[in-house]
Image (cartoon, rainbow, N blue to C red):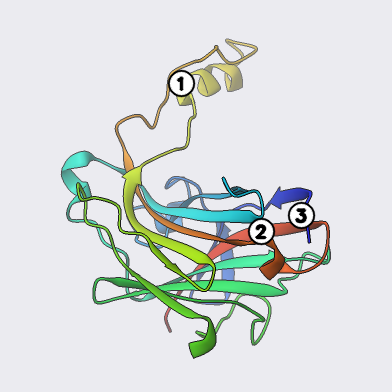
Amino acid sequence: MKKSKILIGAAVLTIAGFFTIAADHIDAPAVIGGTSDIADVYAFQGQNTNNIVLATTVQGMLSPASTAGASFDENVLLEFNIDNDGDAVEDLVIQAIPRDGKMYFFGPIAPSQSGLNSTILADTATRNEVDITAYGGSAIVENNNGMTFFAGPRDDPFFFDFAQYSEIIAGNATSFNSPGSDSFEGTNVLAVVVELPKSMLGSGDSVNVWVESKRKQ
């Protein structure tokens, strides 16, 4: 079934499984310096137009010097939430959890419960894994069950001119420059990427996608 429209939800950080704090490139005080800070979430049509690509980045603003020592937190679950009927409640999830140098994926699968708390859905039928790519190494990509998986450090793809934004907020400018300056140039993130057939996400014409990071209790 063709998905004609993709709606991208905001990244959400879940603290202790009980309440949420908006997070974007360490601008939320509760997650500054933490390993569960979500930088961005992306959803877009794949090069194969029958596929959709879901990606999230965490631990933004990593300098090249610090990237080699950065790692996914084994106590943090990253969860893609997919709403395929327009009610803003997740119908399917894709879970990603790191262990011993690998990123394990489960889903897409119906969650055991909606909302802030989650249980890892260790369903062998939807389980996939990929070695986490080392900084400076060639990208390690795994293909299985019609899906493609990646996890590892990458240059931050987000473009934002923070200095010009500050000028606009201060009333000293009325618009952004073209192309402007990339405030995130030279910084890295840890990325998790899944590409899968659109048909795996339901039969509707659109999906809403958002990401949560959830810390083990």
Residue 3, numbered label: 3
Quarter that holds the N terminus = bottom right
Q: Is residue 123 visible?
A: no
Q: Is residue 208 left or right of residue 177?
A: right
Residue at disc 3, secondary structure: loop
Q: Which residue is mark 1?
A: 163
Q: Are marks 2 and 3 in contact (CB under 8 Å)?
A: no
**CA gap, disc 2 to disc 1?**
29 Å
Q: Please report whichever mark, 2 or 1, sits nearer to the chain's N-terminal start.
A: 1
Q: Crowding near pointer 3: few (<14 within 10 Å), some, many (20+)?
A: some
Q: On screen, 197 above or below 96?
A: above
Q: Position of residue 198 (x, y in %)?
A: 68, 61
Q: Please report whichever mark, 2 or 3, sits nearer to the chain's N-terminal start.
A: 3
**CA gap, disc 1 to disc 3?**
37 Å
Name the mark nearer the viewer: 2 or 1: 2
Q: Give the number of marks.
A: 3
Residue at disc 1, secondary structure: helix
Q: Position of residue 102 (x, y in %)?
A: 30, 72
Q: Crowding near pointer 2: few (<14 within 10 Å), some, many (20+)?
A: many
Residue 209, numbered label: 2
Q: Please report whichever mark, 1 or 3, sits nearer to the chain's N-terminal start.
A: 3
Name the mark nearer the viewer: 1 or 3: 3
Q: On screen, 207 above or below 163?
A: below
Q: Position of residue 200 (x, y in %)?
A: 67, 69
Q: Are marks 1 and 3 in contact (CB under 8 Å)?
A: no
Name the mark nearer the viewer: 2 or 3: 3
Q: On screen, 78 above or below 189?
A: below
Q: Which amino acid type is marked by label 3? A: Lys
Q: Report the residue at 32% width, 42% height from top.
A: 188
**CA gap, disc 2 to disc 3?**
13 Å
